[in-house]
Each structure stands twice: as structure tokens, then as C-alpha cells.
Image (tube, rainbow, N blue to C red):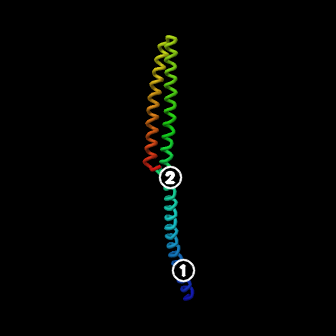
Amino acid sequence: MNIFWELNLQKGGENMATKNNSGSNLIVYLVVAVLVGGFIGYLIGQNNKPFSQAYMNQTASMMKDNGSTMMQMGKMMMSGGAMMQQKGQAYGDQEMMQQGKELEENGQMMQTKGNSMSERGTGMTQMMGQ
């Protein structure tokens, strides 16, 4: 009976040691998982910054390009509106003259807004030191 009791104590002692080791292993695994997860989250966050230097350069370039396009569209609208007014006057068509005038005014507005957008893009580029 004494041998049986000693075996049970040894076995119980081993189980207790194993339980302690598995508990400390679990804590180590949790700490490592948190550190790895934090590092991966940091890397993902760094790559997705909405106001990074590259993002701002791209935005400024887009503003300049779109402003230039708007100015060209405005010129075309103004030219088309002037042509409509001339044709309306030649044919005595008041409605065509009015539509031409409105198209020319909208073209002027488009050109002004395009110029403003282009200037803002240029200002952003200069502000960033490009």
C-alpha cells in the first residue's frame, strides 16, 4: 500500500507540474500572439494612412489635371454658346440665342471653377515642397 501511495503522489505531483507548465505556456503564447497581432496591425495602419505624402501628391496632381480639363471644357462650352447665339441671330431664333447665352455663361462658370481647382492643386504642391 505504501508503494501505491508513493506512485499516486508522484503522479499527482507530475500532473501539478504539467498544469503549471501548460499555464505558463499559455501565457507565453498569448503574449506572443498579442505582440504579433499588434505588429501586423501597425504595419497595416502605416500602409493605409489617408494623408501620406504619396496620397497628398496624387491628390494635388489630380486637382491640377482636373482643373485643366474643366477649363478646357469651359472654353468649348463658351465657344459653342457663342456659335449658337450667332446662328440664332442669323435665323431669328430667340430660343437658340437664349440657349447659346446660357451655355456660354455655364462655360464661363466651368472655366472659373477649373482655374480655381488648378490653382489649389498648384498651391498644395508648393506647400508640400515639390
In the rendered view, does 47 fall on the left or right side of 123? right
Q: Nearer the viewer, mark 1 or mark 2?
A: 2
What x and y, as percent, mark residue 121?
Answer: 46, 42
Is residue 109 shown above or below 61?
above
| Distance from the alpha carbon under mark 1 to that under mark 2 | 50 Å
Extreme residue toward the bottom, this view: 2
Query: Which residue is labeled 2 in the image?
Result: 48
Q: Amino acid at mark 1?
A: Glu
Q: Which of the numbered marks, if any, corresponds to residue 119?
A: none
Element under label 2? loop
What x and y, as percent, mark residue 105?
Answer: 44, 24
**Foreground residue, 115 or 93?**
115
Is residue 82 shown above or below 130?
above
**Foreground residue, 35 or 124?**
124
Counting other residues with Cα less than 10 Å from the Cα at mark 1, is it few (<14), some (14-19), or many (20 or more)? Answer: few
Is residue 28 shown above or below 113?
below
Counting other residues with Cα less than 10 Å from the Cα at mark 2, is it few (<14), some (14-19), or many (20 or more)? Answer: few
Extreme residue toward the top, this view: 92
**Foreground residue, 37 or 89?**
89
Q: Amino acid at mark 2?
A: Asn
What x and y, as percent, mark residue 62?
Answer: 51, 42
What x and y, as percent, mark residue 26?
Answer: 51, 70
Residue at 42% x, 48% y: name it. Answer: 127
Residue at 49% x, 47% y: name it. Answer: 57
Element under label 1? helix
Query: Which numbered disc, 1 or 2, marks the residue that appears first in the sequence?
Result: 1
Residue at 54% x, 76% y: name it. Answer: 18
Residue at 49% x, 10% y: name it. Answer: 92
Query: Which residue is labeled 1 in the image?
Result: 14
